[in-house]
Amino acid sequence: MAFKDLFATKFRAPWASFFASAENREEIAGQLEELLLLADIALPVVERIMANIAKKAKNRDGKEETLELLRQELLAVFAGQRRSSLAAGEKNVILLVGVNGSGKTTSAAKLARYYQDRGQRVLLAAGDTFRAAGSSQLGLWGEKLGIPVVSGERGADPGSVIFNAMQSWASKDLDLLVIDTAGRMQSKENLMRELEKITKIIGKFSSRQPAETWLVLDASTGQNALVQAEKFREFSGINGLLLAKLDGSAKGGGVISIAAQMRLPVLFVGTGEGPGDLWEFDAGEFVDSLLAG
Ligand code: GDP
C-alpha cells in the first residue's frame, strides 16, 4: 500500500455525509468541527483551525470553499517542516528516545530495515539494558533482518554498549547506526541525566553526531506528548518525531495535533508491528489522503 492510501478509506464515509447534509455556513462549521474532533484532533487545534477558516471564508454555503480552506489549514500545520534526508554514503547516527512502550525498539528495527533497503550499511545498538527483554528483543529483530546488533548484558551500563557500538560504526565501513534506548519517564531526573551522558559519548566520536535524535511517541498519546517532548528536548536535543502506532489511533488526527503543538518535524510514522510498517512522512500526501473522497 502507498502512504497516500493509508488514511483515505477511514475518512471517506464522514466526508461524504458532511457534503450531503449541511445547508448553511453555521451548519457547515458545526459539522466540520465535530468531524475534526471525531478524527482525534485536539480541541485547541480544532478551535484554531475553525477560527482561521471562519476568518477567510467568503461564501455563505461554500462547502467546497470550506474544504479548500481546511486543506490549507492542515497543510499550514506542517509548513516549514523538514524531511529526514539521510543519504547513503554519509555516516549518521539516529538516537531514539521516549517513554516505555512508545515503540522505540520496534521502530529502531523498522528504521534499520528501511535504510538497509535503500542501500545503507546499518548497525543497531541495543541501548535498552534496563528491561529484561530489551536487548534480546532487538537481537531477534537483527537476526530476522540480517542486521548486526551491538548489545550488552542486562543491567550493563548503556553508556558502554553505546560506546562499543560507536566504535564499530566509526571504524567499520558502515553508514548508519540506529540506537535504541531504555524507556524513561520524563519526570525521572536521573534517567534523563543518563540520556545526557549517552549524547555526550556519541558526540565524542563525532561532533556532528547524533545527527538525528528522534522522540518516539505513541500517536494516541494526546496532550501528554507535549510534556514529554519538552523534557526530552531539554536533555537530549531532539530534532524530530517518529509517531508509532498510527494504526491504533485509527484516524490520523493525532499526527495533526502533535505537529500543530510542537515545533518539531514529523519524520516517520509507524502503522503496525511488522518490519515494513514504517513510512517516511509526507505532509502533502497525508493531508490529501485525509481529505480524499
Ligand atoms: P519500547 O518500549 O518503546 O521499546 O516499545 P516497543 O518497541 O517494545 O513496543 C511496544 C509494543 O508496541 C510492542 O508490542 C510493539 O509490537 C508495539 N508496536 C510498536 N510500534 C507499533 C506500531 O506502529 N503499531 C502497532 N500496532 N504496534 C506497535
Image (cartoon, helix red, strand yellow):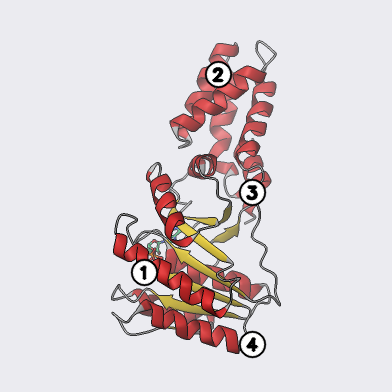
Under circle 2, the secondary element is: helix
Name the front one of labels 3 and 2.
3
Q: Nearer the viewer, residue 141 or 91?
A: 91
Spatial separation of the CA atoms under disc 2 and disc 1 = 48 Å
How far across and how far down the image is residue 87, in percent? 70, 70
Q: Which residue is mark 1?
A: 194
Tag of residue 81: 3
First in residue order: circle 2 vs circle 1 = 2
Q: Quadrant of the N terminus?
A: bottom right
Q: Amino acid at mark 2?
A: Ala
Pick whichever of labels 4 and 2 is earlier in the sequence.
Answer: 2
Q: Nearer the viewer, mark 2 or mark 1?
A: 1
Question: Where residue 272 sits in the image (x, y, percent)?
Answer: 47, 59
Q: CA distance from mark 1 to mark 4?
A: 29 Å
Few, some or many residues within 10 Å of mark 1 (<14, 14–19, 20+): some
**Residue positioned 46% across, 55% down in the render:** 233
Determine the secondary structure under disc 3: loop
Residue at the spot of label 4: 173
- Label 3: few (<14), some (14–19) or many (≥20) C-alpha neighbours in 10 Å: some
- Mark 3–mark 4 contact, CB under 8 Å? no
Q: Sequence-wise, which precedes: disc 1 or disc 4? A: 4
* Separation (CA) of disc 3 from disc 2: 28 Å
Q: Amino acid at mark 3?
A: Gln
x, y percentage for residue 113? 57, 73
Q: Amino acid at mark 1?
A: Glu
Mark toward the viewer: 1 or 4: 1
Position of residue 198 in the picture relative to residue 169 (left or right):
left
User: The residue under label 4 is which amino acid type?
Assistant: Asp
Q: Which residue is mark 2?
A: 29
Query: Dot 1 lies on which element?
Result: helix
Label 4 vs label 2: CA separation? 57 Å
